[in-house]
Amino acid sequence: MRNAFADEILSLALADERIVVLSGDIGNRLFDKFKAAMPERFHNCGVAEANMISLAAGLASSGLRPVCYTITPFVTTRCLEQIKLDVCYHSMPVTIIGTGSGLSYAALGSTHHSFEDIAIMRCLPGMRVLAPADAPELRNLLRSTFEQSSPTYLRIGKKGEPVLTEGRHFQPNRWQLMRKGNDATILSCGTILDEALAAAEALSANGIHVAVWNCATVKPLDLETLSSLFPAPVFTLEEHSILGGFGSAIAEVLSTYSSPPRLQRLGIPDIFLHDTGEQHESRAHCGIDAAGIIKSVTAALR
């Protein structure tokens, strides 16, 4: 996904002279083409992420459209005060890209895990929160970002995510139905969509037909789609803590319904991962790989 981001932001910047890129001392070779084409519009802010956000807010107040890019925890938890007061309080059109979100950097330990970024970003007034599933969706969401004038946070993966949304109709702020089913519904958020689809395929072989929705827009939620779901059990799936994230956002809305469907949130438990491993190993440990999803759905429907 990071390669797709670098390619797309180059194309967008060539067409829109307001776009500037700020990097937190990461992805230098990734942006070689951008720097060659527009060296005056690329700023490596170094390992000073809070300063990068404040600089972006200043550039935005001057009429530019800054994009801040670095590893997810470094551009969210480390910069919360600056995002809150410099960007959101003044409604500055700054786009924040958190790369390697969730368990993408699982093997590097807790410094690089981002289990709380959705929770933090979605509680800030005016902040849009987006979690694309793959590179094509990232491109679509990035293009739509510059059609609006609000602060935006995109949490993206790292590399190697399977392409799942290519050729599908894209509509900003709307979720995509990836698979039909009436026995249960999985609302999948972000790059973990492949696990949801693999689980649904395996469950269908046992006569359990699960609908799978790709829910890239976390804030604002697609309330129209949410209100139209079958009254079957709903499972939210995210590579984020079960506290405060996408599942919590869904629970908040369903709590206002007179007869809400049964909801189960699948995500990172309320723990630190002290045993490090690769992304697929950590997903399995947390019960959010395809096997874990199958187990949760089967138990709930039993």
Image (cartoon, rainbow, N blue to C red):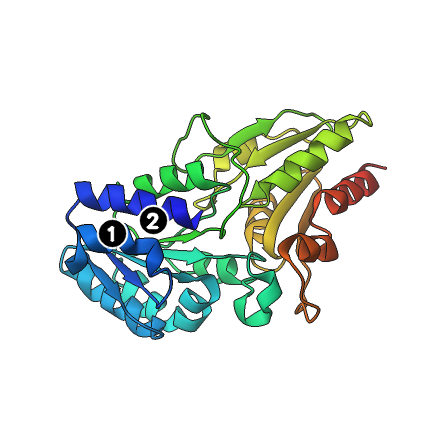
Indicate the amino acid at tag 2: Ala
Q: Which mark is residue 34?
A: 1
Picture residue at 34% right of the left edge, 49% below the top: 6
Does residue 62 show up? Answer: yes
Residue furthest toward the right? 302
For mark 1, give the secondary structure: helix
Which residue is labeled 2 in the image?
6
Q: Picture quarter containing residue 194?
A: top right
> Depth check: 153 or 134 in front?
134
Percent x, y for residue 166?
46, 29
Q: Which of the labelled discs sits on residue 180, or is there none? A: none
Viewer-proximal residue among 241 and 250: 241
How far is disc 2 from disc 1 in space, using C-alphas? Answer: 8 Å
Label 2: element kind: helix
Q: Position of residue 105 (x, y in %)?
A: 55, 61
In the image, residue 252 above or below residue 258: below
User: Is residue 260 visible in the rendered structure shown here?
Assistant: no
Q: Amino acid at mark 1?
A: Phe
Tell me the crowding category of disc 2: few under 14, some 14 to 19, or many 20 or more residues within 10 angstroms, Cα based: some
Q: Quadrant of the C terminus?
A: top right
Residue 36 located left or right of residue 26: left
Q: Quadrant of residue 291?
A: top right
Q: Relative to 63, does residue 176 appear above or below in the rendering?
A: above
Q: Is residue 20 left or right of residue 159?
A: left
- Name the residue rendered at 49%, 57% in the picture: 100
The answer to which quarter of the image holds residue 208 is top right
Q: Are marks 2 and 1 in contact (CB under 8 Å)?
A: yes
